Amino acid sequence: MHDSHSAPNPRAVLWDLDGTLADTMSSHFRAWREVLAGEGHALRWETFAASFGQRNDTALCSMLETELPASEVERISGIKEERFRALVREEGLGLLPGVASRLRASRDTGWRQALVTSAPRANAETMLNVLGIGAFLSVVVTGDDVALGKPHPEPFLRAAEALKVPPSQCLVVEDSPSGIEAARRAGMRSIAVGPAHASLPATLGVASLADLPIEAFERLLADGPAAPPIERW
């Protein structure tokens, strides 16, 4: 096993959470739909999906197609997140295919690892506890920790700084357009995973981490600062 903290040329994997490590989309949709119904709004899946991966202050206004006072965003978001956490605790949560083996392999080959999520810290802590993967992650950056969320690069740059790894040596794993754009703006290579991978302008796209060869992470950083061409696997 490698000691990632004493490596002369450190590398890092920056993981998104929702939709990347675990499939939480349906739980988020259920929570939002229930809460917004109580506010007199009917939420369609397509409207929800278009804002998935963004912070609540952006996503809620997008879903309702109107600007809300900060106090209203905080109130509605708080109710929704409480409902989401209850669903996770009641129904459980599982890692997506290939995630567990990739987390272990990255740790064992000296990669530093961080979680970078738009979720509130309480959500991230609940999910990490249910998933049992907190020990793999040296740094956790949540939506509560940044002034600007994805697609702004601040979340990824903050994680890289905390890990003491240059952005050029960071690899982002994401499933959303906002996350992939944030990685690009941060000057980081990216892997798009999940059903929408083919439509995302990441460095590499793959339906599932289980489909990636074991050397894929190494290959993506092998060519130095210049980003390699987009690939689809």
Image: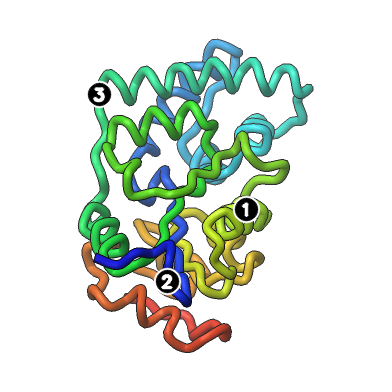
Mark 1, residues whose alpha carbon is within 10 Å: few (<14), some, or many (≥20)?
some
The residue labelled by disc 1 is 158
Mark 2, residues whose alpha carbon is within 10 Å: few (<14), some, or many (≥20)?
few
Instruction: Specify whether 75 is left or right of 228.
Output: right
Mark 3, residues whose alpha carbon is within 10 Å: few (<14), some, or many (≥20)?
few
For numbered disc 3, what is the local secondary structure? helix
- x%, y% of residue 11? 45, 70
Of the two numbered discs 1 and 2 on the same chain, state the one appearing first in sequence.
2
Work out whether 75 lies above or below 4: above
Q: Which residue is pictured at 42% across the width and 71% down the height?
A: 7
The quarter of the image holding the C terminus is bottom left
The residue labelled by disc 2 is 7
Determine which quarter of the picture holds residue 25.
top left
The Cα–Cα distance between marks 3 and 2, rounded to whole angstroms, is 40 Å
The residue type indicated by label 1 comes to: Arg
Q: How is the image coloured?
A: rainbow
Q: Which residue is pictured at 54% across the width and 23% down the height?
A: 42
Work out whether 206 lies above or below 8: above
- x%, y% of residue 106? 31, 64
Q: Nearer the viewer, residue 202 or 112?
A: 112
The residue type indicated by label 2 comes to: Ala
Determine which quarter of the picture holds residue 127.
top left
